Amino acid sequence: KREQVLVGRPVSPGLRRGPVKVVGTPRQFSKVQAGDIMVTRSPDPGWTPIFGLLGGLIMESGGQLSHGAVVAREYGLPAVAGIAGATQLLHDGQVVLLDGLSGTVTVVS
């Protein structure tokens, strides 16, 4: 089985392995556990409280100055932006290796 590698823009350095949680709205925050890697379209300032739980962040849109990237750096979380369709490509419970320095997300299982 070939590893699936998604490539985006590195926006916050760090390396983290963990389970994915796809989050579309703040109503879904309750499913996020400590250390999860949140996958979302683009978080806004109302999402800041969830960052303390996260192991990392994958965003479909945004760049270095996007809210998600700035907050991820403040929290020391690895983050990758610009992975089109990430919320469809990745699924809750999949384990990924998130590399916020290279901008890659490798699906491990």
Image (spheres, rainbow, N blue to C red):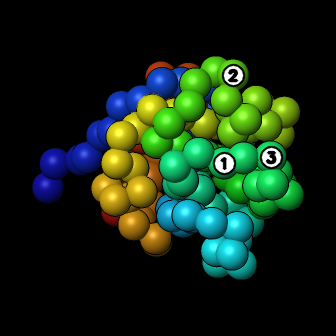
- Rendering coords of residue 86 (x, y %): 39, 50
| Residue for point 34% across, 59% down | 88
- Rendering coords of residue 36 (x, y %): 63, 61
CA gap between label 3 and label 2 equals 13 Å
Which badge, 3 or 2, comes first in the chain's sequence?
3
Q: Quadrant of the C terminus?
A: bottom left
Position of 21 with respect to 30 (left or right) is: left
The answer to whether residue 27 is visible is yes
Q: Nearer the viewer, residue 69 or 6?
A: 69
| Residue for point 45% across, 32% down | 82
Label 2 SS: loop
Q: Which mark is residue 45?
A: 3
Q: Pointer 2: what residue?
A: 65
Q: Pointer 1: what residue?
A: 43
Q: Residues within 10 Å of mark 3 (few under 14, many from 20)?
A: few
Label 1 SS: loop
Q: Residues within 10 Å of mark 2 (few under 14, many from 20)?
A: few
Q: Amino acid at mark 1?
A: Pro
- Rendering coords of residue 73 (x, y %): 76, 30
Position of 76 with respect to 42 (left or right) is: right
Residue 53, image quadrant:
bottom right
| Residue for point 24% across, 47% down | 3
Q: Amino acid at mark 3?
A: Pro
The answer to whether residue 76 is above or below residue 50 is above
